[in-house]
Amino acid sequence: MLSAGHLLGNRYRLDERIATGGMGDVWRGTDVVLGRVIAVKVLKTAMLTDPEFAARFYGEARMMASFRHPGVVEVYDYAGADQTDDERVAYLVMAYVEGEPLSARVRQGPISVIETMSIVAQAADALHAAHQVGVVHRDVKPGNLIVKPTGAVILVDFGVARSNAVTSVTQLNAIVGTALYMAPEQVAKGKVSAATDIYALGAVAYHCIVGQPPFDGDNALQVAMRHLEDEPEPLPPHVPPEVRELIARAMAKQPTDRFETAAAFAEAAYAAAGPLDWKRMTGTALVAPLSPPAPTRAVPAPRDLPFAPTTPSRKPQRSETALLVAVCVVVLLAIGLAGALFLRGKEGKNVEKQGINVPSATATVEESVAPLPLPSVSSNRPSLRPNATRPAASPTATASESPTSTPTTTTPPTTPPTTPPTTPPTTPPTTPPTTPPTTDPTTVPPPAGAGT
C-alpha cells in the first residue's frame, strides 16, 4: 500500500493523494531530480493481474505522448509493473495542473453562458489536436476537464481513449465511457469516431448552463438508453439562439448531423464566447489556439491579433533601388571631389614655380642692361636711361615707379647677376620715359663736355 513519502523509481516522491478513479489513484508528487511538482497516476494493485487494464494503462501513456497541445496534459514518464525493483507498481508521470475539475464547479450551480462557451471552445480545440493523430478520448466529462485559475482548460485522463495506432483492448460487450455524457452510437456499440467526443462535449455544455446533465435515471443503463432515444429538455430562456443551435447540433443523434470536426465546434463556441484573453489564460504569449483549422474551410487570421500576415509588397525592392542610386551618387561625388583636389594641388605647384622664377628673370635682365652706355642727349633735364626694348624681358620689368625716386644715384643690384648680357639693345630710345623706374636706375655720368 502506497503512502505519502513513498519514492517511485528512486526519483518520484508521492506527496498527497488528490484523486481516485476506477483504474488507480492520482498523486501530487515531486521529481527529486529536477525539483518540479508532478502528477503521478498509479495503477491499482488489483489491476496489475488483469492484462487488459495493464495494456490500457500503457496505451494511455503512449497516446498522451503521441501529440502535444497546451490544452492537453503533458506526459513525462511511464513505468510498468515489471520495470520496478522494489514492488509491482505501474505508474504514469504527468505535468501537474493547478486548478479544479469542472465537476466541482457545476456542483455549485449553473455557469454563465459566456464562461461555458469559453470552456467548450478550449476543450474542443484540444480534442481536435487528439483527433488529428487518430486518438478518440471516449470519456469527455466535467471530471476530466481541469479549469485553471486563469480560466484555461486542460483535458486529462486518456485512460479509456482509443487510438488507431494502439490495439483496442476493450471487451467485446463492454460499454466504455460515462453514461451521463455517452453518445448514442457509443451506447449502441457502433463505430466510435471524433463525432463521439463532440456529442459528449455538447452534453457537458448543456450540464454547465442548466446545472444538471441532459438525462438522468435510476441506473447507468437507463441513462445511456435515454441518450439513444430521448431529447433533452429545452435550455433556459436566457440562452442566446446561437448557443441553443450550437448545443443542439453537437448533441444530434446522428453523427453526420453534428459538427464535421471538433475544430468547427470550437470555432462556433469561440464566436459565441466573444474575444478571449489568451495571454492571461495561458500565462504565455499565446494569442490563439494552436490546433489547425478544419480542412474544409479557409484558414482565418488569429483571433485578437493586432495585425494579420500580408503578402509581400514591392517596397523592399524600391528601397534597394533607391539605396543603390544613393550609393552611386555618393561614389560619383567622392570621385569628383578627389579630382578637384588633385587639380587644385597641381595648379598650386605651378603657381609656386612661377613665383620663384619671375623675380630671378627680372633681376637678370636688369643686371644685364646695367653696364650699357647711354647716348648723349641735350636737354634741360638730367640724363636718364630711357626705356629700351629688352629682348626676352618679362612684362614685370616695367612696373610703375614712385615719383620720389632720384635719377642721379646709382644703386648696385642686391643680387649679383647670374648671367652676363647676351645682346645689346638694337634700337636706340626715341622718347624719354613717361614714368620714372620703380628702382634707382643704374646711370653713368655723361663724359666731360658732352652737354650744356
Image (cartoon, grey):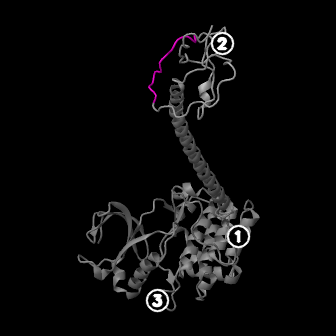
Q: Is residue 332 above or below residue 15?
A: above
Q: Is residue 120 above or below residue 256?
A: above
Determine crowd level at label 2: few under 14, some 14-19, many 20+ residues with C-alpha closer than 10 A: few
In the rendered image, the residue lying farthest to the left is 86
The residue beneath circle 3 is: 167
Q: Amino acid at mark 1?
A: Leu
Quarter where residue 395 is shown = top right
Q: Helix, strand, or loop for circle 3?
A: loop
Q: Are marks 1 and 3 in contact (CB under 8 Å)?
A: no
- For this view, does 235 lie left or right of residue 284? right
Q: Which comes before the other along the chain, label 2 or label 3?
A: 3
Q: Amino acid at mark 2?
A: Ser
The residue beneath circle 2 is: 378
Q: Helix, strand, or loop for circle 1?
A: helix
Q: Helix, strand, or loop for circle 2?
A: loop
Quarter where residue 237 is shown = bottom right
| Magenta-tinted stretch | 406-417
In the rendered image, the residue lying farthest to the bottom is 172
Residue 147: x and y, percent? 53, 61
The residue beneath circle 1 is: 246
